[in-house]
């Protein structure tokens, strides 16, 4: 009879979590900036809860978090930004777009200079609808292969997607302009927000080598009429973090906010227009404040292995090959009254937040304010080396086509063509060093 | 696009993009999967993984998620047509039991003959076969070995270790009446030690604890940051944090219990075949293996799903076979709201006073003063066990489900406030009498 208690004790002791810590902290993108006060920490946690919250269809007892839809893509912010990380693309047609979306428009501009929404589907395909409201349809990715050769003869197989649609509930798409978007990670957002618009203008005005230009996207604020420098979104079509958050809430989850108070229904979507909402607006100003505070105070991704010789060599090559012309290793924030701890900070997002022509192969053909159909905002590279550990399905570039940093480099064209060619011509050791550096970000 | 567009040079490419889109759109459409509508309160990182795995295994179905906290799911599923829901899948035993009483479920439409019906004293579903356990989670301690070692405090092995005065201010505990998973924690101790001794221990533990309220910090945050050394929690929060890199450990105490989550199919499920397929997937080895993912870390309800999991994985079937897991969650269920409410009035609301009184009591005992009566007063609940088991009283306290917010106190709770206050005042008086 003594055996069983002993056995029980032994089993319980063995069950003390012995799991080895993972080599990379999978919560690395979920850390607050250092130095938050107790009140600020509480606010950060409130914002975190909202960012993790699955939103509820109205009417509901959970009246603080109801109002999902009527049309939407996913239930929660973390559905697309799982663990605050980056998303990826489906592997084959029929697979759900878990962390990417399809922007839609028709040729022309709206009253504010932005894309002209599709008359029946709006500016984003919302695959889901609440009960009684048909989801808009399904997008399917079809992958195609393309081989490129490096100077040492090594072949790299690249893939690129085309998209098709099924179950379209509101008629044909016609000649819609379509752009695929994989969700980015959100760490360090506050620092990007704190960069002064004049800094971006100055960066754009700088003379750059290799035919690199770089322009600022400018967004007119509908309420104030002010023109602001864009910095969020893959085409820098959002001027600040608050607007970016509110845009994602309404576009991805159908949650209205003080900034976007109208439901995302087009005139063709009758059931959508008459569905019960979760309040006006559904995301209250305080909730928006809390989410903004949370994202604005997320620490940037940590650098790793900075002292390793290969990484240091790669860092030097990053500059000499021309990557750093756009993927700037250093930026300085301006005066930032909303969060003084972010004022005049030097940080390394590895982006200039400017628009660059990336060539025809990456072009989506969908202009967005001043961004042409060939232009994309320089993707911040911070966190690049940890993204795949945090989320299994991570794809690089706007549509997730690049499975590795090397594939992403090889897709660069347009203003980045010279830098890409230098990479192709580099020795294997040099390429490995560059990739080791990218992996350390 | 106007001819004055700055994008004029790119126009040709836009047209090509449009043409390519039209071509693809005109391809034969993929057959639309049949929907399966699932009401759940699980976090999205869990739901999304199950959704992806289910749709990969069964591309003929598409899982539609309707997210509702249990308190809200109850009314939603009772609507005519169940609001279109086929399946309810959630960690709220009380909701399943209540909806079974209301006749909302049909018999589980899958073969469960090879699945165990119990782990220890935890039933894996209802006797009548209307709902089945889909996973279980255990209660225990998140610990920071480094923080404890720095204070030369051993790792806790059971609940009474948490009464160690050296742990003053170092325990994080969820408020049972506010945090959804927490009410069974109170009952685990009461079942293990008995009513009087159990409440006495809770009083001592509360004196060492900081309470974590709904929607505030995570217990794991408190431990990982070193603000506390031990956090009372349910295992998956902690094991997931560990798997993702948090420098903490999880310890299952000698007296622990399991909280089963369940799955059921609505009586008039609009998509019965899809519902059966979803339930079958959740209970299958493939579905159960999803539970081991670092972002989920829940415990499978079939022994064969533990094969191949890393050494050290808590296996409740093995623990039960060795005599552990004697907590009877079904027996505790009717009283969960009542014991959480007693905890609230006895220990949470007057927490500052409780801390101060225990500090004085501990000083007196350290000085060798007899303080048995004071200890008794601080550890005595406002009602005895028979009263707490009275169904009429339980009805007065009201049915509380995960997600219920603040509410007005019922008359018995107001009376408990007064009783507890009187006990504290008497304890304070006695402490003064002995110079403490």
Image (cartoon, coloured by chain):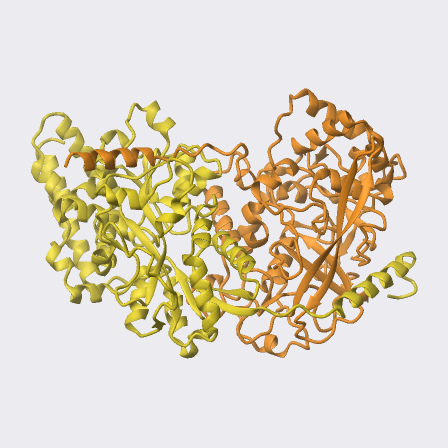
Chain colours: A orange, B yellow
Name the residue: 31% across, 35% down. B169
Q: Which residue, as the protein is rendered here, is positioned at the far front?
A: B114
User: Which image quadrant: the C terminus of chain A?
Assistant: top right
Residue B222 vs residue B248, the one in the foreground: B248
Locate residue B337, reporting x and y percent: 25, 58
Tag count in the figure? 0
Name the residue: 84% across, 44% down. A413
Residue A257 against residue B367 in the figure, above or below: below
Determine the image quadrant of residue B330.
bottom left
Locate residue A40, reporting x and y percent: 49, 42
User: Do we see residue A18 in this rendering?
Assistant: yes
Name the residue: 76% across, 45% down. A158
Residue B161 against residue A267 in the figure, above or below: above
User: Do we see residue A199 in this rendering?
Assistant: no
Residue B67 vs residue B229, the one in the foreground: B67
Q: Is residue B197 left or right of residue A8?
A: left
Q: Is residue B209 left or right of residue A288?
A: left
Name the residue: 20% across, 63% down. B394
Locate residue A373, reporting x and y percent: 82, 55
Locate residue A424, reporting x and y percent: 83, 34
Residue A31 vs residue A87, the one in the foreground: A87
User: Which image quadrant: the N terminus of chain A?
Assistant: top left
Q: Is residue A219 left or right of residue A3?
A: right
């Amino acid at each position: 009879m003594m055996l069983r208690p002993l056995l029980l004790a032994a089993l319980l002791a063995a069950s003390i979590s012995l799991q080895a810590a993972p080599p990379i902290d999978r919560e690395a993108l979920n850390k607050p900036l250092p130095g938050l006060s107790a009140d600020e920490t509480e606010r950060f946690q409130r914002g975190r809860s909202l960012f993790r919250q699955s939103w509820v269809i109205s009417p509901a007892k959970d009246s603080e978090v109801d109002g999902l839809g009527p049309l939407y893509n996913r239930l929660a912010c973390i559905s697309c930004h799982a663990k605050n990380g980056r998303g990826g693309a489906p592997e084959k047609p029929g697979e759900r777009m878990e962390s990417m979306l399809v922007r839609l428009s028709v040729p022309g501009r709206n009253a504010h200079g932005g894309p002209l929404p599709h008359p029946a589907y709006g500016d984003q395909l919302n695959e889901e609808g609440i009960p009684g409201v048909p989801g808009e349809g399904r997008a399917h990715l079809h992958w195609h292969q393309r081989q490129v050769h490096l100077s040492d003869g090594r072949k790299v197989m690249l893939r690129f997607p085309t998209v098709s649609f099924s179950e379209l509930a509101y008629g044909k798409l016609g000649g819609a302009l379509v752009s695929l978007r994989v969700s980015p990670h959100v760490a360090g957002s506050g620092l990007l927000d704190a960069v002064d618009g004049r800094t971006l203008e100055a960066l754009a005005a700088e003379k750059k080598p290799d035919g690199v230009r770089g322009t600022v996207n400018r967004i007119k604020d509908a309420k104030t009429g002010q023109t602001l420098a864009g910095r969020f979104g893959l085409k820098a079509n959002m001027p600040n973090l608050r607007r970016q958050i509110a845009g994602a809430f309404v576009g991805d989850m159908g949650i209205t906010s003080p900034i976007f108070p109208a439901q995302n229904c087009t005139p063709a979507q009758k059931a959508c227009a008459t569905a019960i909402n979760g309040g006006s607006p559904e995301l209250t100003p305080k909730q928006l404040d809390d989410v903004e505070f949370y994202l604005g105070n997320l620490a940037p991704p940590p650098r790793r292995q900075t002292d390793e010789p290969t990484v240091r060599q790669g860092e030097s090559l990053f500059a000499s090959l021309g990557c750093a012309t756009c993927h700037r290793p250093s930026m300085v924030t301006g005066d930032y009254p909303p969060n003084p701890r972010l004022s005049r900070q030097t940080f390394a997002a590895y982006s200039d937040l400017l628009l660059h022509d990336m060539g025809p192969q990456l072009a989506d053909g969908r202009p967005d304010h001043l961004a042409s159909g060939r232009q994309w905002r320089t993707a911040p590279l911070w966190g690049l080396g940890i993204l795949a550990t945090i989320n299994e399905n991570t794809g690089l570039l706007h549509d997730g086509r690049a499975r590795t940093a090397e594939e992403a480099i090889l897709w660069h064209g347009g203003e980045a063509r010279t830098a890409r060619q230098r990479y192709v011509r580099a020795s294997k050791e040099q390429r490995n060093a560059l990739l080791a550096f990218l992996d350390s970000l | 696009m106007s001819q004055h567009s700055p994008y004029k040079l790119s126009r040709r490419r836009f047209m090509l993009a449009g043409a390519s889109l039209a071509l693809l759109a005109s391809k034969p459409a993929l057959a639309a999967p049949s929907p399966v509508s699932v009401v759940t309160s699980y976090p999205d990182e869990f739901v999304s993984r199950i959704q992806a795995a289910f749709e990969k295994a069964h591309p003929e179905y598409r899982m539609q998620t309707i997210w509702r906290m249990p308190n809200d799911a109850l009314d939603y599923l009772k609507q005519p047509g169940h609001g279109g829901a086929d399946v309810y899948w959630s960690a709220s035993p009380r909701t399943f039991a209540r909806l079974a009483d209301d006749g909302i479920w049909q018999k589980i439409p899958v073969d469960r003959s090879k699945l165990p019906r119990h782990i220890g004293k935890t039933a894996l579903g209802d006797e009548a076969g209307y709902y089945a356990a889909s996973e279980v989670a255990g209660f225990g301690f998140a610990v920071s070995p480094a923080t404890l070692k720095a204070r030369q405090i051993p790792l806790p092995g059971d609940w009474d270790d948490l009464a160690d005065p050296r742990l003053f201010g170092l325990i994080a505990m969820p408020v049972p009446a506010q945090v959804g998973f927490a009410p069974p924690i109170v009952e685990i101790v009461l079942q293990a030690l008995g009513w009087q001794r159990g409440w006495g221990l809770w009083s001592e533990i509360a004196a060492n604890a900081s309470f974590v309220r709904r929607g505030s910090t995570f217990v794991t945050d408190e431990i990982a940051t070193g603000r506390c050394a031990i956090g009372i929690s349910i295992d998956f929060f902690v094991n997931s944090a560990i798997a993702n890199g948090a420098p903490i450990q999880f310890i299952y105490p000698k007296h622990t219990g399991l909280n089963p989550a369940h799955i059921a199919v609505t009586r008039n499920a609009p998509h019965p075949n899809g519902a059966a397929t979803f339930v079958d997937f959740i209970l299958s080895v493939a579905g159960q293996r999803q539970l081991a993912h670092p972002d989920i870390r829940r415990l499978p309800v079939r022994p064969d799903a533990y094969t191949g999991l890393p050494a050290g994985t808590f296996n409740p079937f093995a623990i039960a076979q060795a005599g552990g897991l004697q907590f009877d969650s079904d027996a505790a269920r009717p009283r969960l709201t009542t014991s959480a409410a007693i905890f609230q009035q006895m220990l949470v609301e007057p927490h500052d006073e409780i801390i101060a009184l225990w500090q004085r009591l501990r000083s007196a005992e350290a000085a060798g003063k007899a303080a048995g009566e004071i200890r008794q007063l601080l550890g005595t609940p406002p009602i005895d066990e028979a009263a707490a088991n009275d169904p009429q009283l339980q009805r007065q306290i009201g049915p509380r489900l995960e997600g219920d917010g603040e509410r007005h106190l019922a008359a018995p709770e107001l009376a408990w406030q007064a009783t507890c206050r009187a006990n504290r005042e008497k304890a304070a008086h006695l402490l003064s009498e002995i110079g403490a």
